[in-house]
Image: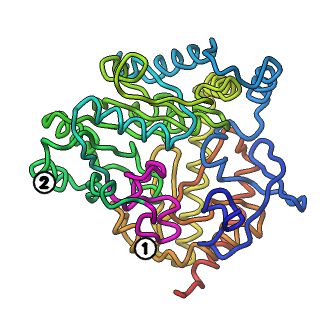
Amino acid sequence: MPGGVNSPVRAFGSVGATPRFFVSASGPRVTDVEGREYVDLVGSWGPAILGHAHPAVVHAVQDAAARGLGFGASTPGETELAELVERRIERSGIRPIEKLRLVSTGTEATMTAIRLARGATGRDLVVKFAGHYHGHSDGLLAEAGSGVATLALPGSAGVPAAIAAQTLVIPYNDLDAVHEVFAARGTQIAAIIVEAAPANMGIVPPAHGFNAAIAEIAHAHGALLILDEVLTGFRVGSAGWWGIDPVPFAPDLVTFGKVIGGGLPLAALGGSAGVMDLLAPLGPVYQAGTLSGNPLAVAAGLATLRALDADAYAQIDAASTTIADAAADALTAEGVAHVVQRSGSLFSIAFAATPPHDYETVKAQDAFRYPPFFRAMLDAGISLPPSVFEAWFVSAAHDDETVAQIVAALPAAARAAAAATPA
């Protein structure tokens, strides 16, 4: 395997450690090939919101597997999941998801949403924000976050210049830049795509009213707003970030991943019937997938969403707050400049004196402090995201005992961060 991994951040390249190979997981813990157990704050990068191997999810998948691994045909579970999503994404009686298309990955969901926006508007250009990661399709890797930020890559080789030129990249949280790009190219722009609350360059919350403002600007120019909730959807609340954003707004398309599949490959895009019906077989915008709506993945997603009730979210929020506050206290005690950035239960540490508000300020932090911090936590049996540019994921299985173990490991990690020097 190139680099020994099947997804770059797993190589632990940015934290100077040897990657762990895991063989089992249960609740808030994972176990590696040598039998060492860790408290997990990666959570399969988000899907394990109930904890690993949650009994209801495992049983649902086992039952589905016993009936067949896939049929290449429609199943009742697909409709059940679509209806559940449509009901959950509600705010003050408004439901932006009228129809849903199931796909297999977040990359596929955002790629399809872009194609659909272009088909709906007859325009070619897309606006994205620097540091936002929307998967690895050609047109969306320009100044992306996540692994691209971790590896310090400018984009990706293999992307034709003509494709990259159709993506207009502007600074995040900068409404002047949004107005300027639409003033210059507004009649050619099909859509703005935005992470609902960015979590792929670390957590960088949207400025108050930012999402509502960009929706208004896009709509004034005949463009669509694509809201990427692959990470935040069903994690920061029952209706995702859209449901808790302080200023209500109207997205045209919403993409989902991670939690919606309960740990199996599943993602989705949804929106109004008028836009979604442009997809084949009803409309001219083509998308297909042999494994789309796979019955095992649908079963995992249904079981996960049904178990995500108010009590589960309350547990996640409480544990997240305790861990984030303890991390801040430990770093403060060692005199390490830092900011804990939060969006709902998602949080990350930025080694900076002031809160980063865009990709440039995120990259300006003292990132060299994270590798020793990470390694100290790993030595103490805590598995953190192996990159300073990723969010920490807490699950409903992180009980008081688990949280106490995390809190106990933080002072030594903070001392390691304080002693770090630039390479």
Cα–Cα gap, marks 2 and 1: 28 Å
Residue at the outermost top position: 76
Residue at the outermost left position: 183
Residue type at numbered disc 2: Glu
Tell me the element at label 2: helix
| The C terminus - image quarter | bottom right
**Above-or-below relation of 41 to 421:** above
Residue assigned mark 1: 365
| The N terminus - image quarter | bottom right
Span of residues in magenta:
129-158
- Locate residue 235: give its quadrant: top right
Q: Residue at position x 21%, y 41% from top?
A: 213
**Above-or-below relation of 26 to 80:** below
Residue assigned mark 2: 180
Residue type at numbered disc 1: Gln
In the rendered image, residue 285, in percent from the top left (x then y), is placed at 36, 28
In the rendered image, residue 55, in percent from the top left (x then y), is placed at 79, 29
Q: Residue at position x 59%, y 72% from top?
A: 14
Quick check: 267 left or right of 193? right
Q: Nearer the viewer, mark 2 or mark 1?
A: 2
Q: Neighbour class for label 2 at 10 Å: few (<14), some, many (≥20)?
A: few
